[in-house]
Image: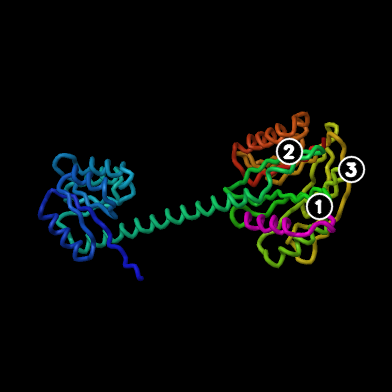
Amino acid sequence: MVQTKQAAKILVVDDNETNIEIITHILLNQGYEVAVAYDGEYALELAEVLDFDLILLDILLPGLSGLEVAKRLLGMDRSKNTPILFLSALNETADIVKGLETGAVDYITKPFQETEILARIRTHIKIKTLEKERIDLLQAIQKDLELAKSNQENLVTFQFPPSPLYQIYTSYKPMDLVGGDLITYDLLPSGDLDILFGDVTGHGIAAAMVSLMAIITFKTMDKSFLAPSESLYWIHNKLTPLINTHFISAIYLRYKAEENLLSYSMAGHHSMFLIREKKILKLGTKGFCLMMFPDQLNADNEDIFLKSGDRLFLFSDGMFEVPNDKEEYLGDHKFTELIERRLDLPSKEFLESVQHEVLKYSGGKVADDMTMLLLEIK
């Protein structure tokens, strides 16, 4: 069934019956729906129960003045966004200025000219319609963002499987409602723990979609017979034909807890920190970011045996590529010093303190997705 466009509803407030007749006649001939009030009190009663697209309001009214009525209308939830046009004589300039300062959007002078009335009314109804469409669109986007955030929270890992041999802590603070950083894991049939940690270029919805695609690819691939570097190649080859606007810097970990053996590979990501005996050892491998070059990744494997008390610290560049109010960046050197001053803290407090200090440096501004993971060996 075809829906017809609903006629705009206009409230006319004027104590002069002749003025009411003239305006009502003009508006009805143009197909508008019209309600009439001869004083401010009744106009407010109508505005409390009916939705109007526009209000024509005489400045000089018995009882409540037009200025007072306008203030009250703009203070009511139902009519706060309804455009108000004052009806005034040419000698009421001072009152017109007060009315516009109150929040009215325009005025129409007496004696009335049909072309002027209709032109101004059409303009402001169109503006109101466009503003409503803008608000509806923003609300729809916000709703979609909330849904995307929920979906991302279901896939980005914040809780890892319990183990008597290790414990994992994470911290995740996206720049926008959704982010492009990713943390996910898989517990293999062998008992090995695989972790994918990454940072998608860019921010917001597009980066979040790429992040989710990488997580889903990781979750659904058979990793049992693949080394960490081979797993990165697999993800790279699966996503490259699908994505040409983003790339991912990534770390792939495989921890054989029974052997204390950590195998890892990197794709364009900066070093991770091995915190051992209150010292920092930087670990990393060469390699290009995922999807940066279709035919090249150059990912390598490295192995290291971990010891009881070791903590492996992974973090996104949003932790150190952080400007202060003078546009001076924290940088990796100062960030390393910041970490060194907190090595005595327990793991959970360690992550909280690091995030707090970085946000303190930036004045509370999140310049990029801020993501951290800490693997603590028991």
The answer to whether residue 158 is above or below residue 352 is: below
Q: Earlier in the sequence, mark 1 or mark 2?
A: 1
Q: Is residue 207 left or right of residue 129?
A: right
Badge 1 density bin: few <14, some 14–19, many ≥20, Cα 10 Å: few
x%, y% of residue 314?
76, 43
The answer to whether residue 248 is above or below residue 260 is: below
Q: CA distance from mark 3 to mark 2?
A: 26 Å
Circle 1 sits in a helix, a strand or a loop, which is it?
A: loop
Q: Is residue 36 left or right of residue 310?
A: left
Q: Quadrant of residue 304?
A: top right
Query: Which marked residue is nearer to the observer: mark 3 or mark 1?
Result: 1
* Mark drawn on residue 77: none
Q: Earlier in the sequence, mark 3 or mark 1?
A: 1
Residue behind mark 1: 189
Circle 3 sits in a helix, a strand or a loop, which is it?
A: strand
The answer to whether residue 308 is above or below residue 248 is: above
Tag 3–tag 2 contact (CB < 8 Å):
no
- Which secondary structure is most common in the magenta stretch? helix
Q: How is the image coloured?
A: rainbow
Q: Earlier in the sequence, mark 3 or mark 2?
A: 3
x%, y% of residue 102?
29, 43
Q: Residue at x 22, y 65 (%)?
A: 30
* Mark drawn on residue 335: 2
Residue behind mark 3: 305
Q: Quadrant of residue 348?
A: top right
Q: Say what amino acid the circle numbered 3 marks.
A: Phe
Q: Say what amino acid the circle numbered 1 marks.
A: Pro
Quarter of the image for the N terminus: give it: bottom left
Q: Is residue 220 magenta?
A: yes
x%, y% of residue 237?
76, 64
